[in-house]
Structure formats: structure tokens, C-alpha cells
Image (cartoon, rainbow, N blue to C red):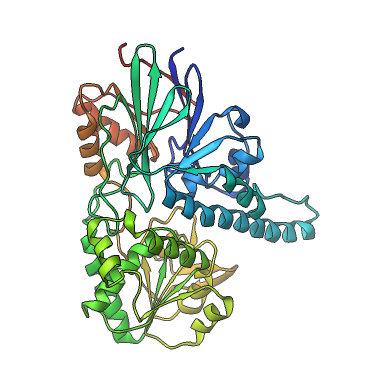
Amino acid sequence: MAIVLQFCGGVGTVTGSMHLVATEKARILIDIGLFQGRRDEFYTVNSQFPFNPSSIDSCIISHAHIDHCGNFPTLVKKGFRSRAYLTPSTRDLCHYMLIDSGYVQEEDVKYVNKINRRRGLPPRWPLYTKDDAERSLKYLRTLEYYKKLPIAKDIDLTFFDAGHILGSSIPTIDIRTKKGTTRIAYAADLGRPHLPYLRDPEIPGNVDYLIIESTYGARTRPPIETAEAELSRAINRTVKRGGKIIIPSFALERTQEVLFFLSRLLRQKEIKDIPIYVDSPLAVNITTVFKNSWEYFDEETRKLFQKGPNPLEHKNITYISKVDESKRLNDKPGPMIIISAAGTCENGRILHHLKNNIENPYNSIIIVGYMPKNTLGRKIFERQPLVNIFGRPYQLRAEVVVVDAFSAHADKNDLVRYVQECSGRRLKRVFIIHGDPEQSEALRKTLKSMNIKAAIPRKNQVVYLADRSD
């Protein structure tokens, strides 16, 4: 039997990563991400699998972003009873990310059903609940970087560091056949070199097939160092006006990255000595994981945690979990910085901070992440003069600053360089996933011009891989 690779999700889009590897003796799932879309599509896509979950021998989770791990509770609900392998930090992060995802779904359904009752419509159900997420955690098993582990009768797994977020990995599977060993490396998502905290992305050797992301397959990004200068300028302008700085931020990775720069700017006296509030229970929990996982960071950051100053702590930084503490921020005068989730401004406490600050021209809103279409965050990013928050229109009078240098994804140059470094004489083909169609196609054309065989699979496409000796 040939090695079979089926692309079940995360192709032609940047969400819902899920890929199936089948051999003569095993069926392995790489990533089990949530497809993130509008409510009906979200439920339909995520509640159906193109395979029987109980037939999966092992699952591999590359990292804790919800579009790569977030549908694991559904997999368990539908019959998966094997082990899911991930790095220790990813396990710790998934504990919070999955439970929070279940809670958010329950709250969303409560709101929708309240409206549906008034309209005489039938009730809806969450894809999974907080309790479902908690029950799924018992199937998680940790594997340290670089330790090879048999996860099926003919498959060994090794994790290499992806340099994308804390705990992120490049799962590399070695499939043993009668003709030799075939190695598949899965680089989605892939980080940028020289990011705060993180080690640079690593190159597994002797790769036969490379699966790689293409989020920025056609784009280059400014160096991450420019983000610090842009933050400093925007904050200092707002401080002179006596205003508040509102930063919508994803709870995982982006919040900690922003804090890294802010604490350094404070210590270097590049910004005024003003209070910084991290107002997100999920971000607070995740930051605790970061503090407890310092041994997985790059050498510079490990020294900071060992000898100080701790990059996630400063006398000006206050972490907020309780609702009443969050509400009190509305009555405190500026200047101050408030970092809050969700990063797209679609839900969470950030909505309340925007509602209370968006119409004041002395204030600033700093955009530090990608804002998908049709979200409140995108409308603010586009500087639309009137935006709806909680169903009520608000005039956008606050200054909007976009710091484009923030990104945990490799850009075009990084991706091409990574493929080149994997392109030994064994590399047969590159599969391009996790990108909008134009980004994936641009990367494919670039690789083709370098005489590297690359393909863009369709969703649910099945590909038969040759043994190493074929």
C-alpha cells in the first residue's frame, strides 16, 4: 500500500488545519483545527469529518492556536479514543484555549437562542461545551522536542521547533516501509527569525515531502524590530494628549509579544511611566504559562527570566481577571494602556473598552494583528467613520495606528529560504497549504521558478506518495 495523504482542511484558506496520513498499518491525523467562519458555516464544517474519528490511531497537534487544535473536543465527542501528541507547552496552552473555546460557544448559543425564542425559531447547540473540552484533555500526551517516539506500528514522530508561538512544532513523521523510510515534515505555521522569546524555526534533515504554509506567500513584512519604534511613537503622541491607548490583541502570543516590547520601552525610558493593564482572563492564564515555560525560549529571553528583568513583569503592568476590576478602568483618567481580547474585536472585554473610548479624539487604538473581513476590527483598521458596537453606532474619532511589523508568520522570503534549506536531494515535492489562494499560488510560482516541485492541494484531495526508493 502506498502512503496516502489527504488534505481535510486548511487548504485554500488560513483556518481549520487538518490532514490525514494513512499507511498500510496506521491512520494518523496531523492537526485538528477549528474552521473559523460565520455561525452556520462554522457549525456545518466543524461537525463533519471525512473519516471515522474512531479509526484514527494517533493525532498530532502542531501548536495551540485554535485553528490548529480547536476541534479536538469534537473529534473526541465523535469517537476518537487514542492519543494526541503535542509539546509540553502546547499541552499547557491547550488546557486554557480549548476550555475557553467551549465556554465562548456556550455563551454565543445562549445569546442566539434568546433571540430565536422571540422569533419562534428552534434552539441551536454549541459544537462542544466547556465540559466537553475538559473531557478531551485526558487524551493529550506530551513529547519533548527532538525525541523520536513510535506513535503507530510503522510511524515515528519527532518535534522540531517552528519558532511560531510558545510550544509550536514542526511535526516530522518517519514512515517505515519495506523499501526504507519516508520522511514528511509539516511546517504550518512557521515563524519568523528573531522574534521575541522564540527560537528560530528549525530545519528537519532528510525530508522527502514538505507541507508548508503560505499565509504570506506573496508578501514581505518589515523587520519585527520596527514594531517597537512604531509603538513608542504612537504611545508618546497619545500621552501628550492625555489619552488612553487601546490595544486589541489575541490572548495567545500577541499579547505577550506586545508586553515584551512595552516593558523594554518602559525600562529604556522610551515611553512615559504610565500604567499598563492586561484585561483578559484568558491572556492572564496564558501569560502564566509563558512565565512557567521560560526554558523553551531563546537564549536571550532565558537569561532575562533567570537573572532579570522579567520581560512579562513590571511595576506598571497589572493583570486583570475580575469583571469589576475591568469596569473600573472606564472611570480612570488617562494616560494608560489597555491590552484586551479578542484580537478581532468581535467579542470579549475589548468591546467595552472600545465603546467607552472610540469617540474620544485624544485616545488611540493600536492595531497589532490581522483583522479578517467583516469584523469590527477590520472596520476600525479601515478607519470607517461609523462602527457598530453592541448594535449601536459609534463615531470613530480616536486615532487609529496600524503596526504592521507584528506577525508570527514567515513571510515570502522566509518561506522560500526555508524550502531551500529543506531542498536536499531527497526532497520530492512541496505541498502548499494554509493560505488564501493568491498567496499560495504566488509561492508555488516562486518555487517553480527555482525548479522545486510544488503543488497546491484542494480540500479533501487525496495524494499517493511514493516510497523513498521509488
Q: In the drawing, does residue 328 fall left or right of residue 203?
A: right
Percent position of residue 44, x then y: 62, 40
Residue 377 to residue 133: above or below = below
Q: In the drawing, does residue 242 fall left or right of residue 424?
A: right
Which residue is located at x 58 percent, y 55 percent? 99
In this rendered view, identify the residue nearer to me: 254 or 12: 254
Percent position of residue 348, x then y: 54, 66
Q: Quadrant of the C terminus?
A: top left
Q: In the drawing, does residue 302 fall left or right of residue 93?
A: left
Report whether residue 400 is seen: yes
Report whether residue 407 is seen: no
Residue 333 to residue 443: above or below = below
Quadrant of the rendered image containing residue 361: bottom left
Residue 367 to residue 372: above or below = below
**Direction right: furthest residue:** 120
Percent position of residue 425, x then y: 20, 22
In this rendered view, identify the residue nearer to me: 126 or 394: 126
Give the number of callouts. Answer: 0
